[in-house]
Amino acid sequence: QGQFVESGGGLVQPGGSLSLSCEASGFTLDLDYYAIGWFRQAPGKEREGVVCMYSRVSGGATYYIDSAKGRFTITRGNAKNTVFLQMNSLKPEDTAVYYCAAADSGHGCYSHGINKYDFDSWGQGTQVTVSA
C-alpha cells in the first residue's frame, strides 16, 4: 500500500463545518480491495475510529461512531483516490488531529464497528480545532 495525505483542517467555531480531504498516493482506493477509515486523536487520548466504509461481494456499508452520526459524512471523490469527510455542527470535543487510513478488504471496518489496528498507510493528519 501507499500513503495518504490529509488536508482541510483548521480552526472553526462551535456549530461550524469543515470538509476534510484524503488523497491516496501510490495506490487506488478501490473499495473492492480496501476499507477506508477516518480517525482522530485528541491530545492525551488514544486514536479512535470515527467513520469507515467498505464494499464487499455481499454488499457494502458505512459505520459511524455514535458521536459522528448525523453530523459527519464520508464520501468518495470522482477520482477514486480521494475520500472526503464532511463535518457539520462541530463541537469542541471534535478537536483532534484527523487521519485517514486503509485496511485490506474484509478487515478493520464492520457494520458494528472499527478495528483501528487493521488499518495502516497513515498520513500526517490534519488538525481540526473547534473553539470560540
Image (cartoon, rainbow, N blue to C red):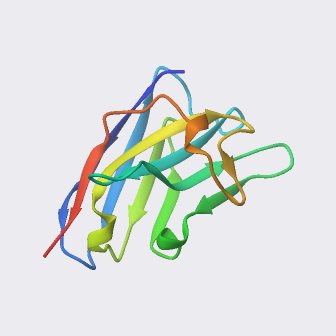
Q: Position of residue 37 (x, y in %)?
A: 53, 47
Figure quadrant of residue 64: bottom right
Would residue 10 appear left or right of 70 to someone viewing this image? Answer: left
Residue ID at (47%, 28%): 121
Residue depicted at x 26% and y 71%: 92
Q: Is residue 35 visible?
A: yes
| Depicted 108 relative to depicted 131: above or below | above
Rendering coords of residue 81 (x, y %): 49, 35
Q: Relative to 23, is 132 on the left or the right?
A: left
Front-most of residues 47 and 24: 47
At horizontal 72% and vertical 58% (from top left) the residue drawn is 111
Q: Position of residue 106 (x, y in %)?
A: 75, 39
Q: 62 above or below 120?
A: below
- Give the image quarter of residue 96: bottom left
Q: Residue furthest right?
A: 58
**Total tally of numbered discs in the picture:** 0
Quadrant into which the C terminus falls: bottom left
Q: Position of residue 20 (x, y in %)?
A: 35, 53
Identity of the residue furthest to the front in this view? 44
- One can see residue 80 in this view: no
Q: Front-most of 52 and 76? A: 52
Which quarter of the rendering shows the N terminus? top right
